[in-house]
Image (cartoon, coloured by chain):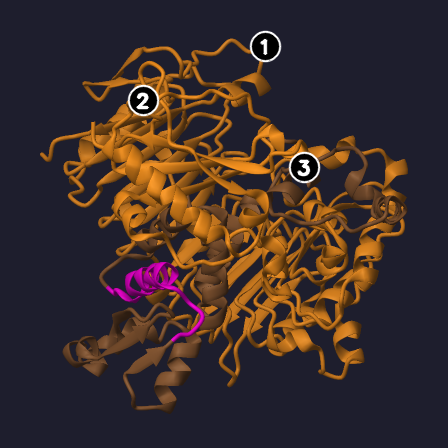
Amino acid sequence: MALVRVVVNFTLASSIAQETHELDCRVFLNDDDGHLVRPTGPAVAGVARCTVEEWMTARRWRAMERVVAALEYILSHSLSHKFRSVPILQFFTFKLKLDRSAAATGCGNNNDVSDRMSQLPDDILISIISRLTLREATITSILSTRWRHLYTNITRLVFPPFEEQRSLCVEYLQQVEEKTFPDYIKMIDRILDSHNSSHSLKEFRICIPDFKGANIERWLEFALTRAVEIVDIRMTYYLNAEHWPYAFLLSTLITNKNGNLPSFKSLKELRLCNLDVDDGEIEILVSNFTLLECLSIERCRKLRNVSVVGHNSMLKLKHLDICSCGYVESVHVANLMNLVSLRCCRLRFTYVVLLDNVPNLVKFNTCDQSRNTFDLVLSRFPSYILDQLLHLQLEITTLYIRDIMAAYMVPKLVNVRHLELQYNMGFPQTFKLVPLIEACPLLEKLEVTFSWSENRKFENRELYENFYPKKSPNKHLKQVRFSGYVGCPYEQEFALYIIKKAVALEQLIVEPLGPDERARHSGVRTPVITPTQHRELKLGGQESRYPHSGQTTKKLPNA
Amino acid sequence: MVTTDEKGPLTAKKKSVIIRSCDGDEFLVSESAAVLSTSLKKILEEKEDRLIHLSDIDNKTLAMVIAYLSTHADDGLSDDLKRSFDQEFVSGKEFDVLKYLVLATDTLQVTCLCYTVAKKMADIMKNKLVEWVRREFDIQNDYTPEAEAEIRRLDAWAWDDRQLEDD
């Protein structure tokens, strides 16, 4: 067994409480894998002794030399010495990993190993505690007087429960009783009051229900009057009906400051949810925050015609997301040189997207809406925009579909490489997707997420046979992922169609419907395959297995 | 990628800098790696001399920083690879090693490494009892019991329902 590494384990024995004041330095030997090599029979690690004072002061390196000497001694005498076992209080353990060679030459030059955390300059400590949760950062004030006010300088203000579980946020808040809200508000106010104004702020996130006393104007002003980079304020639901819709005065905040808001030159990301911004305010926002890269507006009731047009100034905007704003009739995006991704979801049922001069737009995300299915939205795009799209994310639903039997009329998408489909059909009609797949000749990666449907058992062979004709094979499709897969007929048909079409398929990942998802639909008997069971499933004539991990990756040979 | 083409990749790669640690050992670093550090970049802009002496960074730490800089200056590596390198870079390192690393990155102004290390150090502190942190990081509690109680009262929300769990 090769001894490559030696761990020196200093243990201050319980005797510290008594007179001896000595430090036992024991040497343990580790093998390649880091396992402790247990000495067979009684064997001693050489014990180098030094006094506690020696250890605690700078002279400890002289003590270290003794340890190294002991170490060499042990290595040369193998493990033949007697091992003295002393019950030790693990009061203070300090491990130092030494290479065998390093041990021989003396070790390191860090002359003050035990002066630890507090020695670091404030800036670094602040940068460290900024990465803790707000709660943990606040608690550090108890450590010592040195730490008393450090937390008031933290650069990330992410109010709980935002950080802990973003997805559980809403559920968490619904459990919180209304009477605790004043305390919550008090907490936010206290933190904002105590926060050191001279320090810049990187991140400011609040996610709370809309309730009385929520002083959003103040919070927003607080964030924007510092050179903040990310602002994310979301009201999750309406507790008090009279507060709806929230009066939100972004433009007054901006105009009151006469264009001297520090965040004009710093804000990179702005996300607002359930806060009402109007069309004019969006324009003010975009023209004033010149460094803004990501703008996301969700559930806003005042927006009608969103217009984000870069005039002569070069806007940095990369991501634009307008989602769940039920009154938006048009989204006009033009002259944005840096725009990479655009998301328009759940707007007014007749909404239109007007695009012009967005040379870098490659990603588009939308969903089906009443008479405004994704193919219609896409077909209104100028053809040169369609040609530049590389990545499409679509949510597909029959809920509002024009003609239940009609397939999508998808325009040619000659450059789309990556397609993500969220398949939310109440009625199983995967054949409708065929024209979409056929419209993307260069598709390389396909991800389909099936969602729960009451009609999972539905089967109509004829329909499928009509819609899955033998089409040209796709030589580019390499990666396919099906999530929420149960294996019911229409999913199988679709999977079969894809597998037959993708002649150069390299990776097929099937993620069966998770247990959480099933629990949500408990009571309904479903042909669900549990991920923990090994079960074979016929898939395109090939056998697919669900391993314990709940995920199947199958390498297919190149055809 | 475009920038290296303009500079001419061959000449750009050949240029190198010698950095000397406080132990007197010298490290040869390509200039493209060195300029990732803001302060080294400044020094290089000011003087022609290709030898930089760093009086407060030791061998071990400097070697780590240089490994990091060279990896990040390598255009051949994808961003994903660099990210996983970052993860590996800080994992399994002792607290003191990280401490010297963060001090060195602060001196050299390597912002991205500074963030990575600070994050790792924060991860060490996460979910730990106050007593654990005090003991592990050698922090002397110099509060009187009254002062400590006062702080707990002021920030009661942080202590309220959930004490940080011991590991």
Q: CA distance from mark 1 to mark 3?
A: 43 Å
Q: Which residues are magenta?
A: B54-75
Q: Which residue is mark 3?
A: B129
Indicate the position of residue A119 as horizontal and vertical percent values: 60, 60
Q: Nearer the viewer, residue B52 or A185?
A: B52
Mark 1 or 2: the one toward you = 1
Q: Write down which chain is painted brown.
A: B
In the rendered structure, are the residues bearing label 1 and label 3 in contact, judged by CB atoms less than 8 Å apart?
A: no
Residue B119 point in image, percent of width and height: 52, 52
| C-alpha span from label 1 to label 2 | 24 Å
Where does residue A391 sit, x and y in percent of width and height? 36, 52
Q: Residue at x 66, y 65 (%)?
A: A201
Residue marked by disc 1: A523
Q: Which residue position is annotated with label 2? A: A492
A377 falls in the magenta region: no
Q: Amino acid at mark 1?
A: Gly
Does the image show residue A517?
yes
Q: Is residue A34 left or right of residue A357?
A: left
Chain in orange (letter): A
Q: Does A459 sit above or below residue A275?
A: above
Quadrant position of the N terminus of chain A in the picture: top left
Looking at the picture, which amino acid does disc 3 mark? Leu
* Residue at the (43%, 11%) spot, across then down: A527
Question: How busy is the neighbourhood of tag 2: few (under 14 within 10 Å), some, or many (20 plus)?
Answer: some
Residue drawn at the location 55% of the way across and 57% of the way down: A321
Between A363 and A408, the one nearer to me in the picture: A363
Assess whether mark 3 and mark 2 are in contact (beta carbons under 8 angstroms).
Answer: no
- Pair 2/3: label in front: 3
Chain to which mark 1 belongs: A
Front residue of B126/A169: it is: B126
Residue A247, compared with residue A77, is above or below; it is below
The disc label shown at residue B107, or none: none
